[in-house]
Amino acid sequence: MALSQVIIVRGKGVLAQDGGVDQKKLLRMYSRGFQLMHDSPNPKESLRHLFRADDRVGIKINTIGGKKISTRSEVSQSLASLLVESGVPDRGIVIWDRTNRELREAGYRLSMNRGTLKVLGTDTNSVGYNFDLVSHLNIGSRFSRIQTDTVTTSISLAILKDHGMAGITAGMKNYFGAIHNPNKYHDANCDPFVAELFDTSPIKEKHRLSILDCLVVQYHRGPAYHARWAKKYETLVFSLDPVAADFVGWQLIEQLRAQDGLPSLEEENREPKYLQTAVKMGLGKASSSEIKIIEEEI
Amino acid sequence: MKRRQFFKAAGGAALLSGSGMGSFLMDLYAFSGQENLSQVEARYYKKHPDREIECELCPRFCKLGDKERGYCGVRENIGGTYYTLVYGKACSANIDPIEKKPLFHYLPGSSALSIATAGCNVNCKFCQNWEISQVRPEQVTNYDFPPQAVVQSAQKNNCPVIAYTYTEPIIFYEYMYDTSVEARKKGIHNVVITGGYINPEPLVELTKVVQAIKVDLKAFSEDFYSSYVRGKLEPVLEAIKIISKSKVWMEIVYLVIPTLNDSPQEIRGVSQWLRKEVGPDIPLHFNQFHPMYLVKNLPSTPVSTLERAYKIAREEGLNYVYIGNVPGHRAESTYCPKCGKVVIDRKGYRIEGIGLSENRCNNCNTPIPGIWS
């Protein structure tokens, strides 16, 4: 059985003391991650395995946590620049989330010009949610038109956080921000909703890549920001397997919790149950024996 | 008259087309993304350390971190304080006959100014108003319609009743409560159309300011509530018991869905429970289901199924049983349980005749329970 591969790239010093980002180092982290992903001589080659020049690539970020604990603007912009280098025109890239307010509060500058890279929320006038309701298993939702109409392929570029209900929020749950009614899917540890949402055609057919922004990880009391449990971690996680990416994210959070003397998520009865549901649905792998982790320090 | 003009005439706030969902949705779509939300501190919640809160309004007891919203989608933790985002923000307002709620033993023939905000604390897969109930308030057009304006509008439109309806009024509890208080000062009645998924304490307080509650009892099994409502049956039964002990008039609607909650055993069970816990005079409406929202694979309820349910409930000793959503059916009317004569003759939402004098049957003088004037 083929193993799923997860790349962990650590970049000590990528975050400066003042919280700023060393862009060059960040780009090197990305480059190395993509090289390792396809054993390619350079990141361009690797990205060309995933995206064509005529693709419209959605980079779904998570900005609900505000400036302190959202996918960083530098992280998404660096990814976009590598995509451009690989041949995707910048006008074919959309960095997006639920609302323009949340994007602004997380430090993003909105950009809606046709000819350039776009940064916008679903609540932008003339965007909104697709009128058609997608009904699939326990899911009944309207999807952002960015996901259904604008983009042809999708990257989930989530920040990794502890989550009081789901256990963790990472690449798969990030797509809760692509629907009109995420509040309906938070009971029962968000299970089976996270997996079933991912399994809907607007997501599954377009998702290509999960990247977890772990420059800072909220490992307890998430998803809100609490400085006391937010760890400067300076890491990016890459995987083509969305379940494996989240599984590894979960393990990282457990490590940080253990280091801080906190009980495991399982002991708090909120381990990310959706992962096993996702495995049963054939969406990916969630066990150490089925995942090959390649870890590198820059 | 154009809608905006009508709105002005109605008292400065918009009366929206809630029942004509088509036109309403056009508005919803056109205004998508325009925020008009309130930030009024919610009632019934507990503060926890680290800016976390626990909502105590409904049996979900949502525990929320900063910036998170409850299941209802309209109550948000902002920096450790819990706020309602829809206070005075109606997304739907209409003038309806009270029979549409349905309330059949409550001021028959009267008009009810009916309002709703976005949101709901359950997620019924057969919801008729999901376009406004299963959304967050940012996704609909929210009109400023504060309590005083609602009351004023009811007066201007000769509505003796204000109905909190369409979505789930429990989730706009503060707005409903304050409007009810204002309305009572002006002699206007307040009626609540609810799924009854509310905790005892806020419900008891609510029964002190409203005059009638219609409860949608969606089935009589926990399995159904878990699978099709995303809630629990037990708290709803508890709510019905609480209301029955208050001074508030109550009626029950049971939407009969083919194969899901229509078995004779279940109908008998609910009828027996109501007779035992509330009494034989509780009006029980068996309404016809039509395919909607996420349950589109089932047919509309056959009238014969509704008639079977009617028969069972009558056998179990309930005196006032109705069949709804079947205009013209004889079981839309109210019959005297003693002599069998029609005391309220209904055709659809219209009252064709009233055979009551001072709350008694004109024919045999039997008292008919209800609020008749």
Image: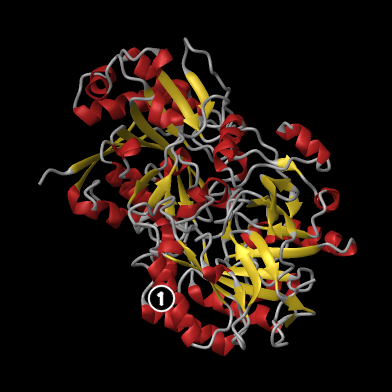
Bin the neighbour count of mark 1 within 10 Å (Cα to Cα): few under 14, some 14-19, many 20 and up: some
Q: Nearer the viewer, residue A163 or B170?
A: B170
Q: What residue do we see at 31% from left, 33% from top?
A: A209
Q: Nearer the viewer, residue A36 or A58?
A: A58
Extreme residue toward the front, this view: B363
Residue B368 quadrant: bottom right
Report whether A181 appears left or right of A51.
right
Residue B324, position in %: x, y? 53, 64
Report whether B10 appears left or right of A247.
right
Residue B196 shows in this picture: no
Q: Which residue is mark 1?
A: B308
Q: Quadrant of the C terminus of chain A?
A: top left
Report whether A146 appears left or right of A113.
left
Q: Nearer the viewer, residue A56 or B115?
A: B115
Residue A70, position in %: x, y? 52, 38
Q: What residue do we see at 22% from left, 23% from top?
A: A49
Given the image, on which type of amino acid does mark 1 rest? Answer: Arg
Residue B271 shows in this picture: yes
Extreme residue toward the right, this view: B185
The image shows residue B321, relative to residue A78, as above or below, that is: below
Q: Chain of mark 1?
A: B
Residue A280 quadrant: bottom left
Report whether B150 appears left or right of B70.
right
Residue A152, position in %: x, y? 33, 25
The image shows residue A118, relative to residue B204, as above or below, that is: above
Q: Secondary structure at mark 1?
A: helix
Q: What residue do we see at 36% from left, 65% from top?
A: B258
Q: Nearer the viewer, residue A148 or B152?
A: B152
